Image (cartoon, helix red, strand yellow):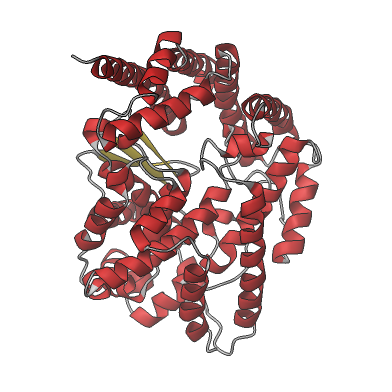
Amino acid sequence: MSSFDQDYLFVCETARKAMIYQTSAETLEWDERTGMPPHGGDYRAQQVAALRGHAHQLRTGARYGEALERLSDQTAGSVLEATNVRELRRDYQRDQRLPQELVESASEMIVKGQQAWEKARHGNDYAGFAPVLKQIIALKQDIGGRLAEGTDQSPYEALMDEYEPGAKTSELAPVFENLKGRLATLIGELADGPTPVDVSLLKATTDTEAQKRFVSSVCQAVGFDFQRGRLDETSHPFCTTLGPSDCRILSRYEANWFPAGIYAGLHEAGHGMYEQGLDQMQFALPMGSYASLGVHESQSRLWENQVGRSRSFITWVLPQVQATFPNVFGTCDVETLYRCVNHVQPSLIRVEADEATYNLHIAIRFELEQQLIAGDVSVDDLPEAWNAQYQQTLGIMPDSDANGVLQDVHWSAGLIGYFPTYTLGNLIAAQLFDHARAEITGLDQDIERGEFSGLLGWLQTNVHSHGRRYSSLELVRQVTGKGLSSDHLLDQLEGKLKPIYGI
């Protein structure tokens, strides 16, 4: 065996061992969000911290780092091996900046933070949550500062780099400004449109147990593999992968807002199908991992919006909706449901926002979390800053902290720098879907018949199979032949929404 092969085998074995600890921690976190008794939290936090600490120790070991350095100096190996070496070395250089004690402290605090957030949101008690959030922000400031030291990144950019490698606030800020400008114009035009949309149909009471069965059947139909995954219920939808054939997606359901369950389900199924489309033989290695969270969000948003809110999808799904909820949707036609699920109205809750206003919710969070890490906004002043941004950007004022600053789990989970990936995902999804439509003959007709395998196969070939070989922007160019542009999303929104509102 060559020296390259020996070193490569060692780093892959080490990465796989570390992943066992990491996925064990994530299994416990999944259980915490789905079934852990309320008083189990303190010990659960210690369990997760210990497991993540062991994973970090393996990923920052001296022998591991030395082997990666030797491998990076050699040219032997395939594209797959070269990608694994390059990305594992990148991860190592990032991880070794953080002491194990800090990683364990942050892991423990984040578990406690999510528990505190859950309680605070249900009780509309920001004051009770603030002390925990202060500790989390302080830890993330410390981590961001350590990661940014000696680089051209700000602490916030260093945190964002974990989710979207190489992303710069200086590059993202103009994207948000351009979106805000065109979206504000579009939203204003729609508000004055001659054919407003009545969504009272979607507010009619539907049984949540029936919703669960219905959403499960839709997720299976679009391609989520229930032999390698499962769907559960939680307060804030998410997706987590616990092994190469074990992907968990979680949704939530509201008796008086029908879209909540189905669109959260489609969103998380999109995440899940990306995870299930990765190379199982490369699990725990970069070539078996997602390119970035922006790309991950593109997969979830594509199935939720480009597919799920299309007239073709509504044509397919309506008979199933009618069969499941005949008293509510029995006399509904395709055009009525299509208009309802594409209505536009500024609202308080991000996960329930329409396509036109959604990115404005992200822009607010993007600005606020930069200010939190920079110390320009304090945790105590955060609700006031949040409410002011909502009034300024969306023209509405939160009626409570539960529907305002407490609505998202992300900051309690330490996910600072995550929010911008949602907007990147929206942009990537739109551009990918335009290209898929150009390459897959009769795609709209396939969706109308409930045939989703062509689109899923196209995504598996063009997106999932590449793992971390390309950055998000490189992947977009590789697949579509063009750089990332906001025009695809904006043109899609204008082309769909203006006719609905009679413009």
The foreground one among 403 and 183 is: 183
What is the x, y in percent for residue 455? 25, 61
Q: Judge from the rendering whether residue 245 lies leftward or rightward of residue 96; answer left or right.
A: left
| Residue in the picture at 34% in, 20% down | 20
Judge whether 498 appears above or below 420 on screen: below
Say which quadrant the C terminus sits in.
bottom right
What is the x, y in percent for residue 250? 39, 43
Quarter occupied by residue 249: top left
The foreground one among 36 and 370 is: 370
Q: Judge from the rendering whether residue 121 lies leftward or rightward of residue 426; answer left or right.
A: right
Residue 243 shows in this picture: no
| Residue in the picture at 49% in, 75% down | 491
Judge whether 157 appears above or below 19 on screen: below
Quarter occupied by residue 331: bottom left
What is the x, y in percent for residue 489? 49, 68
Quarter occupied by residue 242: top left
